[in-house]
Image: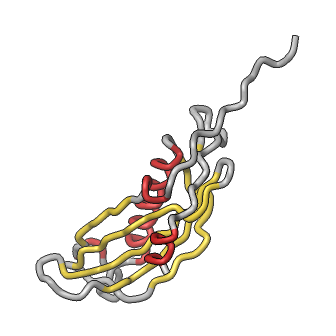
């Protein structure tokens, strides 16, 4: 008897905007390192959380971090800063997705300048109930007006 296993079907393509995620968190003195600034690991966790949520939205189910392809810390973060992480898909393969995250900081209790403090690029793999890779929707190309705005 032939194998009756049916390969999962790839869902319809989706635009990057459909899975964008923005997370915000107020940094406290509990998040600081020995230098009095926010520990890089705290920022990395926020980046991973935002990217994971965007990947899971796109995949319409669980997705796990496969790699951190790049991370840059651009400016120090201090207790009392409101960090905002914005995640958006850059690429979708058959089972994997690349997510770009931009992190900004501003004082939580004042209107003032917003500073870009970190960026990250991570790759996620969508998984099924048995933790095996599963297909994800393709990523639709950005509309010309959106591509111009992103530049």
Residue 123 in view here = no
Observer-nearest of 71 and 59: 59
Q: How many numbered marks does the figure carry? A: 0
User: Where is residue 10 shown, x and y percent of the image?
Assistant: 64, 39
Apparent side of residue 3 relative to residue 71 in the rendered image (left or right): right
Apparent side of residue 67 relative to residue 81 in the rendered image (left or right): right
The picture quadrant where one finds residue 2 is top right
Apparent side of residue 97 relative to residue 2 in the rendered image (left or right): left
Which residue sits furthest right? 1
Residue 54 in view here = yes
Q: How is the image coloured?
A: secondary structure
Classify 40 as above or below 142. Answer: below
Residue at coordinates 58% horizontally, 39% vertically from top-left? 11
Observer-nearest of 2 and 12: 12
Residue at coordinates 23% horizontally, 88% vertically from top-left? 113
Which residue sits furthest left? 109
User: Where is residue 1 shown, x and y percent of the image?
Assistant: 88, 10
Residue at coordinates 43% horizontally, 80% vertically from top-left? 118
User: Where is residue 123 shown, x and y percent of the image?
Assistant: 60, 61
Residue at coordinates 18% horizontally, 87% vertically from top-left? 112
User: Where is residue 17 shown, x and y percent of the image?
Assistant: 43, 58
Classify 10 as above or below 64. Answer: above
Classify 23 as above or below 120. Answer: above
């Amino acid at each position: 008897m032939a194998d009756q296993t049916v390969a999962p079907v790839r869902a319809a393509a989706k635009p990057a905007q459909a899975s964008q995620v923005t997370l915000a968190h107020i940094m406290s003195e509990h998040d600081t390192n020995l230098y009095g600034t926010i520990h890089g690991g705290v920022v990395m966790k926020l980046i991973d959380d935002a990217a994971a949520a965007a990947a899971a939205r796109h995949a319409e189910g669980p997705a796990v971090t496969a790699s951190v392809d790049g991370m840059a810390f651009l400016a120090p973060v201090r207790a009392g800063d409101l960090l905002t992480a914005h995640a958006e898909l850059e690429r979708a393969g058959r089972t994997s997705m690349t997510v770009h995250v931009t992190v900004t900081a501003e004082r939580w209790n004042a209107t003032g300048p917003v500073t870009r403090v970190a960026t990250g690029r991570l790759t996620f793999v969508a998984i099924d109930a048995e933790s095996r890779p599963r297909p994800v929707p393709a990523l639709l190309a950005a509309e010309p007006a959106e591509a111009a705005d992103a530049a």
